[in-house]
Image (cartoon, helix red, strand yellow):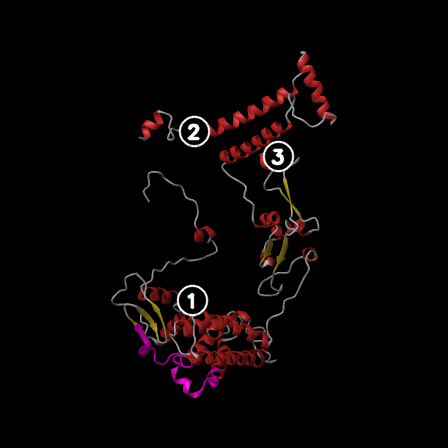
Amino acid sequence: SKRHDEADGGPYRSIPEDAPKQIFNFIRDLKNKYHRHEKSEPLTSADDDMCDRKRRKLSNGKAKSGKQTCGSNSGLEKNIETTYLHIERLFHKYSSLFEWVDGPLVSSMKNGSILLLDEMSLAEDSVLERLNSVLEPSRTIVLAEKGGEGPSCAHDSDMSCEVKAHKDFRIFATMNPGGDFGKRELSPALRSRFTEIWVPAVSHRHDIDLVLERSLSSCIEREMICDKYIMNGMENIRKMILDYIDWFNNSICDDPNSFWNDFKLSLRDILSWTRFIADTHLKTKSTGQWSAYVHGASLMHLDGLGLGTGVSSEDALTTRDKAKDYLIGQIPPEGTSEIIGFQDELKGIKDSFIATEKYFGVNPFIIPTGSAKIPDDSRFNFMAPTTGMNLRRVLRALQISKPILLEGSPGVGKTSLISALALASGHNLVRINLSEQTDISDLMGSDLPYSSDSES
């Protein structure tokens, strides 16, 4: 039994709590005793005099190689010193409450990795100033925050540790232009330490076509689609997307009298559009190709057209109607019958509402219900035209796994809409009110006092 093994000194015998300290003291005393023996005065006996003469010959390099019979053993001394330093590190690590851990910069410098500093201009000046020595030809950094006490910095003469970059270490940084929505410029001194490269927007039709082809073809391969009708339809949709982008960027945004000069469709917008088409038509087949095409344009930018730009709602509505007319004009006459809730979003909300045990939504967009209990009657009326339109837009955005931002005047029902949607679809809702006093620990969590008597 375990108790019998402990009594007999078996494998389950208890280890003293101060065992690490005892081991460290033993190795330290052994090292000190060895050094005292080496530094002691030589004895007067003839044998020790002979050993002393041999030791002096070895130290002067005059003795031939051979087996040492007496005197200092350099190999043993090195092993004792190495063992002592290793045990010392382990003991300090065991005894310390805190331990220094290298960050991504220091780890990349030591390992020779490629470090990417994304959105560099958003960092504080105090952070960027610490990078100056890394960006210099010497490529070094002094870890003043680490200090020099302890075995980890025993090789340094001062109280700090210096890290020199590996020969393969490379550093890259990205930033948006300084005048882009509150972004600031980097100082000339910091910019002079970089090789600057301007990356223009992807605007050429051929470049965008390559991205569209790869995005749609990868989904076709992943879903193992062999239907030639679907594959030919994707070819037509690619051309229609390219035509729409050219029309919006050139006819709308490049118009001298336009309010949209700085809001051309970007590559990120185009990828969101193709992602919606791939998920709703190619993957789940919940919508037809023409419905996925026009609703993907609404998801991409028409639902939020004008938000955060200072453009009036009337001008945004006029441009939205123009864009919808252009999109519908691209659809063949026989394909317009499958499109629901695009041009007139207020029409037929009541007839399009779906609420079952497994699904909830507004046609053509539904989501599976969750595991929470769904009440028999809801106090929230989804049948109201404006509420139904907003619900359909939210459900449309839920078809892809992309965060959703609702913007509107106070009191229009943004929070109540999401709360009612979660309740009616059986999903648990966690609500957090953010303010100027919100700390990152409110979102991520924090260390709290722990009671050993608590069962939770």
At label 1, counting other C-alpha atoms closer than 10 Å, the crowd grade (few under 14, some 14-19, many 20 or more) is few
Magenta region, residue range: 327-354
- Three-letter residue code for mark 1: Pro
At label 2, counting other C-alpha atoms closer than 10 Å, the crowd grade (few under 14, some 14-19, many 20 or more) is few
- Three-letter residue code for mark 3: Ala
One can see residue 408 in this view: no
From the image, tell me which residue sits under label 2: 17
Numbered disc 3: secondary structure? loop
Gap in angstroms between the C-alphas marked 3 and 2: 28 Å
Q: Which numbered disc flags the more N-terminal residue, 3 or 2?
A: 2
Disc sitting over residue 154 in the figure: 3
Residues under numbered marks 3 and 2 in contact, where contact means CB atoms less than 8 Å apart: no
| Nearer to me, 297 or 139 | 139
- Image quadrant holding the C terminus, namely top left
Foreground tag (1 vs 3): 3
Gap in angstroms between the C-alphas marked 1 and 3: 61 Å
x 72%, y 27%: residue: 64
Residue 337 located within the stretch drawn in magenta: yes
Q: Which numbered disc flags the more N-terminal residue, 1 or 3?
A: 3
Disc sitting over residue 84 in the figure: none
Residue 325 lies left or right of residue 351; in this view the side is right
- Three-letter residue code for mark 2: Glu
Q: Residue furthest left?
A: 376
From the image, tell me which residue sits under label 1: 410
